[in-house]
């Protein structure tokens, strides 16, 4: 089926961060009640932490996974899924939740891994969807090695970043939602948008101001700002 609006804008690339899932009940990292206010990431989200205390690391991710299963996509996730009916939409997310997929988005690239998946410590290509929320010490892959969360920890390479760069370079329109743009290399993706590509940033507390002619800042929560922008794009 021919998609509408294809003459003006063909490909919309969307970069999302923790803020888009905040209204689904998933905490961000760096806001006042964020996850890193109560935990030191060195103790929980690094390869060293996994070596020193795998139980602590598993407990942290098990708790987050259990919480995720109780959350639902919000109006922002649903609006982006709706956008796919009208444009080519590529979502690049820093989030490890699966709320974009559950909302119905089909092109979702995860930069920092996926909370509901686990992988072998020895054979990284052996990746599994975990049944339920709990991963235990002693849960092994089919070749007998301990399974770990399928998460990109601090200090690890971001395997999907090169694919993400290529996707951003093809954007006709770039939307950035709910990210502090402090975590690299993801934050650097904005610099790969083509010259003159409109960029819209939706975040209620962003420090970034719309001084660049191509940049528009919508200082609203995602569940309000994203559906409004999506309607605007569909009706243009
Ligand atoms: P961050 O915590 O650094 O920044 C969150 C941003 O979201 C802030 O700029 C904040 O102003 C904004 N925000 C807060 N509430 C919002 C709302 N209702 N609507 C729109 N924006 C809102 O998060 P980040 O920039 O995504 O940092 C990247 C790291 O956070 C990644 O490593 C990612 O994996 C991780 N993370 C993911 C999840 C998740 O999967 N849902 C949750 C927490 C952290």
Image: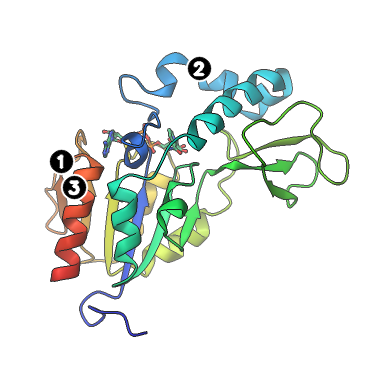
Within the displayed image, which quadrant is ligand 1 positioned in?
A: top left
Quick one: label 1 or label 2, which is nearer the N terminus? Answer: 2
Q: Nearer the viewer, residue 32 or 68?
A: 68
Q: Position of residue 1 (x, y in %)?
A: 37, 84
Of all residues, the one furthest to the top in this rendering is 38
> What residue does disc 3 label?
225
The response on whether ligand 1 sits within 8 Å of label 3 is yes
Q: Nearer the viewer, residue 124 or 213?
A: 124
Left-right relation of 16 to 116: left
Q: Position of residue 224 (x, y in %)?
A: 19, 45
Q: How is colour applied across the structure in the image?
A: rainbow
Determine whether 67 is above or below 189 in the image: above
Tell me the tag on residue 219: 1
> What residue does disc 2 label?
40
Whether residue 66 appears in this view of the structure is yes
The response on whether ligand 1 sits within 8 Å of label 2 is no
Determine whether 56 is above or below 221 in the image: above
* Mark 2 and mark 3: Cα distance apart in space: 32 Å
Circles 2 and 3: CB distance less than 8 Å?
A: no
Quick one: label 1 or label 3, which is nearer the N terminus? Answer: 1
Whether residue 45 appears in this view of the structure is no
């Amino acid at each position: 089926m021919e998609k509408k609006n294809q003459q003006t804008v063909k490909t919309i690339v969307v970069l999302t961060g923790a803020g888009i899932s905040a209204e689904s009940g998933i905490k961000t990292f760096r806001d006042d009640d964020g996850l890193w206010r109560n935990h030191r990431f060195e103790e929980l989200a690094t390869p060293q932490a996994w070596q020193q205390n795998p139980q602590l690391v598993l407990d942290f991710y098990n708790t987050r996974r259990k919480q995720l299963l109780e959350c639902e996509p919000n109006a922002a996730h649903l609006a982006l899924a709706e956008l796919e009916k009208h444009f080519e939409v590529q979502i690049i997310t820093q989030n490890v939740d699966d709320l974009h997929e559950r909302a119905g988005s089909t092109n979702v690239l995860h930069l920092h891994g996926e909370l509901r998946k686990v992988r072998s410590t020895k054979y990284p290509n052996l990746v599994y969807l975990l049944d339920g929320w709990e991963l235990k010490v002693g849960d092994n892959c089919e070749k007998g090695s301990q399974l770990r969360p399928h998460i990109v920890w601090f200090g690890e390479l971001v395997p999907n970043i090169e694919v993400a760069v290529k996707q951003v370079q093809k954007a006709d329109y770039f939307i950035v939602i709910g990210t502090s743009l402090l975590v690299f290399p993801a934050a650097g993706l904005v610099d790969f948008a083509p010259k003159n590509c409109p960029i819209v940033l939706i975040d209620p507390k962003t420090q970034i101001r719309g001084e660049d002619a191509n940049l528009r800042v919508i200082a609203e929560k995602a569940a309000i700002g994203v559906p409004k922008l999506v309607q605007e794009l569909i009706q243009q």
